[in-house]
Amino acid sequence: MKVTLLSTDDLIPIIVSSILFIFLSTIHKTLISEKYSSILQFRAEEDIKRTVSSTVIRIIYIILGTYFLYSICNYSEKQIVLGIFIVTFLNIWPAIIQNHLLKFRNNTTEWSLLLHYIIFVIVSITICKLTITIFIPVLKGAKLFVFLDNKAMTFIISLFLIAFPIELEKIIDKLFRVVIIENADSYREELYILENQLNMKNYYIEKNKIIIDSVARKYDINIDILEAILKLEIFYRRRLFYPIFEKILCKYFSNYAIKKDISVGIAQIKISTAEKILNKDSREFIKKICYDDMNIDVCARLIKLLIDNYENKNSDFYIYEFDIYQYISLEYLGGCFMNKTMMLYSSILRGVMKNKELYYCGMGDNRYSVIITKENIIREEYNKLKNFIDKLENSRKIEMKKMIFIENERIDIEIICYSSETIKEIKKNLEKKYICKVNII
């Protein structure tokens, strides 16, 4: 007799369970954005109240997610547990590989870290199983526990459930705590990965090339440092679902977003930082700050301010202790000097800007190649397009390079222009009907 552990019928429920818990986890991280912590990240130097709050929220969303999948979707315990296992495993696996925690000769710190990750998975699965075997049956009246009717016992159990994961982590931390002097060399592999990612083309950067060039020119900062910071924010701090949740929070729950001072947009700008840079009340711009054009503009203004502060030595005392890239990273991230992220950022910026000026001047004026195409274009459309192009050419905003028109088939136009404002004008008039590709040359 064959025993089937998994069947094809289990596949969809497991995938749906995984997606639901990824979704809930993403909301959790977005709402608890400042110094995000959980039973996985507990450390003595972190805010314990925030850790407790984060852990309780994690337990609640696992219970609610399990209840929804088990009672409403009628998924089995096996399917839900596997879904949670996949999500927690995907959460910890990159860190395990990155820190080489699977080798046998781990030191005490590495064993401690690996144990943290294992407990994270076990606790998540245990909460799910307890929800199915105890919480849901009691809620439906299928099981009755007399001692739960005692108010004192209920109170003690509630405290125990909240405190247990935290105390377990504290015990492990105390048992395996060692002092480590950290510097950029401690994260050589992560630094290597980030440097390689920085050399890759990025969709969001390519999409906003014109805006990046325009604000760099406007605020007189080197494009390379602006692009590097944007890429670091995209690779290192931004996540797939974050833009959606950020826009929802800023548009519909703006008071909450302001109160929590969340980081938003492509540049992960804190709302309080944008308020200082723009010198406006946050309620005036909260619904626009998530959009790339405004977010990049604020980012460029912040970088310019930090460069000027450093050059003029008119800011905090530690300006004399750090180089310009450490200072920019420190102020941009709002952390402390020994922060891992700050050390990685400053190392990356130092490498990107080696032998380069911090300012835009001396970089030369950029030219833009604009390629406009469309299939199945008729004569009437062509005439309207040609009139628009002719107006730009007559006003000396562009230089025609080529135009190929085949009636009822296609049109290919390549023009050269010298201003980002002209690019915006072209896109505004043509982007809805034509394919417009822009390259800096």
Image: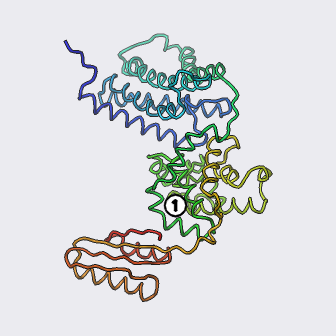
Q: Name above or below for residue 435 compared with residue 236.
A: below
**Which amino acid does the dot numbered 1 rest on?**
Lys
Q: Give coordinates of residue 51: x percent, y percent.
A: 60, 32
Residue in the image at 55% along x and 29% along y:
40
Residue in the image at 38% along x and 14% along y:
143
**Residue 357 located left or right of residue 368:** right
**Residue 332 located left or right of residue 441:** right
Q: Quadrant of the N terminus?
A: top left
Q: Name above or below for residue 184 compared with residue 9.
A: below
Which residue is farthest front? Answer: 355
Local crowd size for mark 1, using a 10 Å CA cut-off: few (<14), some (14–19), many (≥20)? some
Quarter of the view holding residue 226: bottom right
- Nearest to the observer: residue 315 or residue 406: 406
Q: Which residue is tagged 1?
A: 288
Quarter of the view holding residue 127: top left
Q: How many marks?
A: 1
Q: Name above or below for residue 42 compared with residue 202.
A: above
Q: Name above or below for residue 228 compared with residue 163.
A: below
Label 1 element class = loop
Q: Give coordinates of residue 310: x percent, y percent.
A: 74, 59
- Nearest to the observer: residue 416 or residue 73: 416
